């Protein structure tokens, strides 16, 4: 968006979170709070985005966001006015309008901010405030207007200073502002310190009213947007709201969720049409689910990719891949590096780690496959274990196409079972099995089939 700079306030200590993690790095629906305003401004086309950080949290925030934004360091506890001043050298003279938003307000919508900007520019305001009409505004600053007027803003009154409360809905401040840049930089220095020796950006509303310049407050369509996060109770409440939004958006896109309140879907998850999500299922991180799948009940999928027409029944996936038509469960676990090609079947109580099953292979019952390559159309019998760790190093097992691994086979890596070979029940395979041969016994000996 031309001639508009964005400043994100992220230097607060977040003392009420009672955490060693900076407040803006706590996650809501799998995404750090600071990423919400950064991504919002990016979607609005704001080219210059400055994140105001503190000396204590700057390293962690920079590691997360990298060079996608610019950074200003607020070296002292000088309030929100001081935070904007810290960004002045990066913004002043480089944009005609300045948008300021908190780093802890994840539910502010694109539509509300775009409407705020459009109204600000259309009416040539010096200051515009995104507000919300709420029944309970505890802890939030009130928009002070002339009595009986819906237009004239006199200032922003802090909750503790509002002595004229009644049972009527109240208009509160969201902490999102749009300023005419020259007016902002000319008047920011006039903001006086409070009793806590901090200077608050909200005081600019009263300064604008005293100067009789144009200042406006525009209520958002959804009052939940004005809620920020100060503690973990508020974090949980807003996460509950956002999770419901996410579930509803996917249902409207053609996903069936039979018991929405029991399902958790993170913000970055993608789900295809006609997929069914059954109760008590969690889709987390950067997970992609294809179309026509059935997931759950009780499945947990994190940072994984599931192709079309797959089934994941009461199982867990983490950093794993299932191609189209594969199925797993109940009660199995794909650990990082597990890869199931098309039409692979993994049954119950199977754990797979750093291993690839080629198309059409089957492992129907309890066992462990780690650091292995399983060829196409292989049958892995119940109780099969790849013995991949010798106490010091990991080793790989290879089972070539069309092999048949008998029940309770131990594959002591490194070892290869050739194409079309068979292992007998209970075999302990310590040496390679040639193609189309039979291995039986402990340790296994090679026989003709």
Image: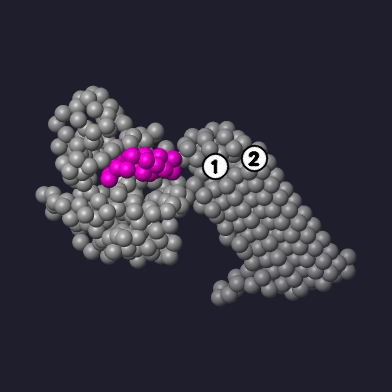
Front residue of this view, candidates 403 and 385: 403
Residue 129 falls in image quadrant: top left
Q: What element carries label 2?
A: loop
The magenta region covers 108-131
Residue 220: which numbered mark, if any? none
Front residue of this view, candidates 67 and 254: 67
Which residue occupies 24% across, 28% down?
149
Q: Residue furthest left?
A: 195
- Density class for disc 1 (Cα within 10 Å; few <14, some 14-19, many ≥20) is many
The tag earlier along the polypeptide, 2 or 1, is 2
Colour treatment of the image: one colour
Q: Is mark 1 on a helix, strand or loop?
A: loop
Q: Is residue 237 visible?
A: no
Q: How far apart are marks 2 and 1 (CA)?
A: 17 Å
Q: Is residue 77 visible?
A: yes
Circles 2 and 1: CB atoms closer than 8 Å: no
Front residue of this view, candidates 165 and 305: 165
Q: Is residue 290 magenta?
A: no
Q: Which residue lies furthest to the right in this view?
A: 449
Residue annotated with mark 1: 281
**Would residue 24 be found to the left or right of residue 437 on screen?**
left
**Would residue 207 be found to the left or right of residue 386 on screen?**
left
Residue annotated with mark 2: 273
Q: Where is residue 16 in the image (x, y as percent from the top left)?
A: 26, 49
Q: Does the magenta stretch include residue 112?
A: yes
- Density class for disc 2 (Cα within 10 Å; few <14, some 14-19, many ≥20) is some
Residue 389 falls in image quadrant: bottom right
Q: The C terminus appears in which quarter of the rendering?
A: bottom right
Which residue occupies 26% across, 40% down?
215
Q: Position of residue 402 (x, y in %)?
A: 82, 61
Front residue of this view, candidates 304 and 49: 49
Q: Position of residue 72 (x, y in %)?
A: 31, 63
């Amino acid at each position: 968006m031309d001639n508009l700079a964005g400043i994100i306030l992220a230097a607060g200590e977040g003392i009420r979170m009672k955490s060693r993690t900076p407040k803006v790095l706590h996650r809501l629906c799998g995404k750090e709070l600071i990423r919400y305003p950064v991504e919002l401004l990016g979607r609005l086309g704001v080219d210059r985005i400055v994140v105001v950080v503190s000396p204590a949290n700057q390293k962690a925030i920079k590691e997360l966001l990298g060079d996608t934004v610019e950074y200003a360091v607020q070296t002292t506890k000088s309030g929100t006015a001081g935070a904007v001043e810290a960004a002045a050298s990066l913004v002043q003279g480089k944009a005609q309008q300045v948008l300021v938003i908190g780093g802890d307000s994840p539910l502010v919508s694109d539509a509300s901010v775009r409407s705020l900007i459009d109204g600000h520019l259309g009416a040539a305001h010096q200051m515009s405030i995104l507000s919300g009409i709420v029944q309970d505004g505890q802890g939030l600053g009130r928009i002070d207007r002339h009595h009986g007027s819906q237009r004239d803003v006199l200032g922003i009154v802090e909750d503790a200073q509002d002595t004229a409360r009644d049972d009527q809905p109240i208009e509160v401040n969201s902490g999102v502002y749009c300023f005419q840049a020259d007016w902002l930089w000319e008047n920011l220095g006039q903001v006086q310190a409070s009793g806590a020796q901090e200077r608050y950006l909200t005081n600019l509303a009263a300064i604008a009213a005293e100067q009789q310049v144009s200042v406006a407050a525009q209520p958002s369509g959804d009052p939940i947007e004005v809620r920020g996060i100060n503690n973990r109770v508020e974090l949980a409440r807003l996460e509950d709201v956002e999770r419901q939004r996410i579930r509803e958006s996917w249902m409207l896109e053609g996903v069936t969720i039979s018991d929405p309140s029991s399902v958790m879907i993170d913000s970055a998850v993608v789900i295809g049409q006609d997929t069914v999500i059954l109760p008590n299922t969690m889709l987390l991180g950067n997970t992609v689910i294809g179309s026509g799948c059935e997931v759950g009940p009780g499945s947990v999928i994190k940072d994984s990719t599931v192709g079309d027409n797959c089934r994941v029944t009461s199982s867990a996936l983490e950093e794993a891949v299932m191609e189209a038509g594969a199925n797993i469960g109940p009660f199995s676990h794909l650990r990082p590096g597990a890869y199931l090609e098309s039409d692979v079947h993994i049954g119950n109580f199977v754990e797979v780690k750093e291993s690839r099953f080629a198309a059409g292979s089957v492992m129907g019952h309890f066992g462990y496959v780690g650091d292995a390559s399983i060829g196409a159309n292989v049958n892995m019998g119940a109780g099969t274990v790849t013995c991949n760790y010798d106490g010091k190093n990991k080793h790989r097992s290879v089972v070539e196409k069309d092999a048949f691994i008998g029940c309770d086979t131990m594959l002591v890596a490194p070892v290869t079972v050739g194409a079309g070979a068979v292992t007998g029940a209970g075999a302990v395979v310590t040496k390679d099995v040639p193609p189309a041969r039979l291995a039986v016994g402990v340790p296994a000996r090679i026989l003709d089939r």
